[in-house]
Image: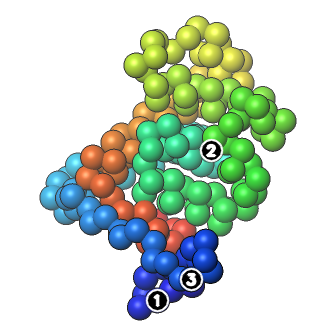
């Protein structure tokens, strides 16, 4: 429900209460640094060409969850849903270790590799994580997967640092 264009929710007493105010972006970096934005778009396209589209979206969502990038979560969950991904698999992705039965061995290897590459402050990418991924993907696929994981992490850092605002994306908007 909305009031004057602003979303509202019911409070404990059943009365409408407005949601918190939307934060404005700190910087429209695509306009401030268009050459960087264009290079990122090209890198994204190149990396993604070698990755299964379902796995690519799962990787984007999981990295965005780990990096707390609300804009990218908004975008990639909507894109995944529009492409036919189930709500259940998207919701369970944040607890994939307890919900492995929702994913294939190949998807699990990609998700685990995503976490290892995204959270490098926990240490290097463990050999066993890399070996699982290498067993599921050929060298070309693995190279593209690593690139795709790296690219979404870069997008997340742009999104979080410039405070890109979630909620306004529609699937395919930037294609």
The vertical placement of 134 against 51, above or below, is above
Please tell me whether mark 3 sits on a helix, a strand or a loop. Answer: loop
- In whole angstroms, how far apart are the C-alphas of marks 3 and 1? 12 Å
Please tell me whether mark 2 sits on a helix, a strand or a loop. Answer: helix
Q: Earlier in the sequence, mark 2 or mark 1?
A: 1
Tell me the quadrant of the picture where the N terminus can be found: bottom right
Would residue 166 be found to the left or right of residue 8 on screen?
A: left
Q: Position of residue 122 (x, y in %)?
A: 46, 16
Q: Residue at x 51, y 72 (%)?
A: 170
Q: Nearer the viewer, mark 2 or mark 1?
A: 1
Q: Quadrant of residue 59?
A: top right
Is residue 173 visible in the rendered image? The answer is: no
Q: Nearer the viewer, mark 3 or mark 2?
A: 3
Q: Position of residue 51 (x, y in %)?
A: 60, 40
Task: Quickly name the residue at label 2.
Answer: 58
Looking at the picture, tell me which residue is in the foreground, 15 or 131: 15
Q: Earlier in the sequence, mark 3 or mark 2?
A: 3
Task: Quickly name the residue at label 3.
Answer: 15
Q: Residue at x 23, y 49 (%)?
A: 36
- In whole angstroms, how far apart are the C-alphas of marks 3 and 2? 38 Å
Q: Earlier in the sequence, mark 3 or mark 1?
A: 1
Looking at the picture, tell me which residue is in the foreground, 107 or 39: 107
Task: Quickly name the residue at label 1.
Answer: 3
Would residue 160 be found to the left or right of residue 45 on screen?
A: left
């Amino acid at each position: 429900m909305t009031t004057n264009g602003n979303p509202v929710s019911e409070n404990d007493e059943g009365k409408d209460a407005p949601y918190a105010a939307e934060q404005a972006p700190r910087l429209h970096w695509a306009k401030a640094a268009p050459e960087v934005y264009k290079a990122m778009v090209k890198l994204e396209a190149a990396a993604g060409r070698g990755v299964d589209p379902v796995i690519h979206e799962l990787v984007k969502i999981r990295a965005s969850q780990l990096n707390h990038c609300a804009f990218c979560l908004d975008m990639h969950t909507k894109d995944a849903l529009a492409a036919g991904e189930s709500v259940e698999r998207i919701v369970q992705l944040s607890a994939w270790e307890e919900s492995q039965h929702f994913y294939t061995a190949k998807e699990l290897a990609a998700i685990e590799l995503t976490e290892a590459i995204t959270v490098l402050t926990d240490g290097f990418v463990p050999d066993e994580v890399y070996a699982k991924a290498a067993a599921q993907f050929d060298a070309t696929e693995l190279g593209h997967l690593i690139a795709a994981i790296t690219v979404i992490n870069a997008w997340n850092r742009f999104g979080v640092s410039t405070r890109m605002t979630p909620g306004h994306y529609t699937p395919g908007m930037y294609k």
